[in-house]
Image: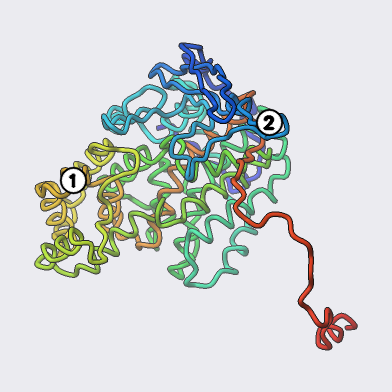
Amino acid sequence: MSKTKTAPGGASGASTSAKSAAPSAAPSADLKEVGSLEAKDSRTGTTYPMKIVQGGVEGDTVVRAMDLRQIKASAGEFGLMTYDPAFMNTASCKSAITFIDGDKGILRYRGYPIEQLAERATFLEVAWLLRNGELPTQQEYNQWVNEITFHTYVHENIKSFLQGFRYDAHPMSMLCSTVAALSSFYPEAKNIQDPGQRHISIIRLLAKVPTLAAFCYRHIKGLPFIYPDNDLSYVENFLSMIARMSEPKYEANPVFVKALEVLFILHADHEQNCSTSAVRAVGSSQVDPFSAIAAGVAALYGPLHGGANEQVLRMINEIGHPKNVPGFIDDVKSGKGHRLMGFGHRVYKSYDPRAKIVKRLADEVFAQIGMDKDLEIALELERIALSDDYFVSRKLYPNVDFYTGLIYRSMAFPTDFFTVLFAVARTAGWLAQWEEMLNDKEQKIARPRQIYVGYGERPYRSTLTERFPATSKDVLRK
């Protein structure tokens, strides 16, 4: 990996290259008509033709939701719309970035299988791929790494900002706030239609989010902040800012470096999940990218999304001992309140392809640090769940969160910090999705419809006897 040494002044300096590499177009970006659908309205007897269109190399077929607007019982009616809580079967965009086939257990970035990228690529190579659509040449990669390395420092005022948080603040709250605060340091980032400004903002976010994450870690530990060491690789530098103490030069455990590099690649993007949808929705208002990415961090904070691997460790702590695993499993099967965290996935109906990779990675890490009670509990959970027909028939296989939580714990990261590690990696995908959304001519400001279930029109009749109580008047006079 190419390395660059720079002074702290690089934090706010101009980009070494303001030129933005234009993302590659999707192989089949346009939706093509492949058939038709006729909908007969039983209220009126009218039949409405609608086009069935197909897009992408995998052949997803859809009907445009706006075509339903033509179906009306009367001229003054709004027209039909779909009701789809949680967007379970609604495509909100066309994307060429990530492909998932949950039934077959497939995950690809720009067409490349995740298994090959995790085995052979670096995280920054994958970050380039997600944004630009193709793997970088050596020259492109060197410049990309140099630019990101040059911008790892953050403004000194960020340190003062972080010191305003309590010692026990959740690191995701801190990260969300500091990422949003970056927009105040780079007001020019609001010029999102300028390719050069988009490029430097993307560079800054990829470079500075690990620094912010490490500063959050040091704050909750009560330790002094460690500045970036730009002689180190991306992952080594992050670990240095996390763990370095008094040693003159930080030397990371190579097993941990490899593990974190692979985990960053696996978490870099995952199609239109909650946090990515949040980035796209907030970004559609044409806000600056720092604010849009902060929205992604906020969405990732939730226990049903990025916080899932935290819940795995909390479940293991609740079980307490390997001998308690069978009883816990019985409680899960009988519905007695316990939930099996880290198993099953909303998208993957077979084995999560990322989990297979992380399982091998976990074995390497456990061989390095040894076994303990919690790891024994986890492995016993895995053994029973993979052999019990109750879980196998329901396709409740271990997912990526099950193993990543164990690896992060083995690396001595506190449980509350797991989601921060997820956010560092997912920043690459969020930025690629954000820029793709901006370049999509069909995209407008996000504005879902609703089905109103409240009162109809009714007259106002006040039940108040006095509109300004005495206490309120006194306050107003002051």
Question: Residue shown at 21%/42% (left/top)?
Answer: 395
Question: Residue shown at 45%/41% (left/top)?
Answer: 273
Q: Nearer the viewer, residue 343 or 425?
A: 343
Residue 464, horizontal then vertical, whole percent:
78, 78
Query: Residue under circle 2?
Result: 74
Q: Amino acid at mark 1?
A: Glu
Residue 17 appears in view: no
Q: Nearer the viewer, residue 210 or 347?
A: 347
Question: Residue shown at 58%/41% (left/top)?
Answer: 204
Q: Nearer the viewer, residue 443 or 71?
A: 71
- Looking at the rendering, which quadrant does residue 446 occupy? top right
Pointer 2 with pointer 1, Cβ within 8 A = no
Residue 471, horizontal then vertical, whole percent:
81, 87
Measure the alpha-carbon separation of dots 2 and 1.
66 Å
Query: Residue under circle 1?
Result: 364
Q: Quadrant of the N terminus?
A: top left
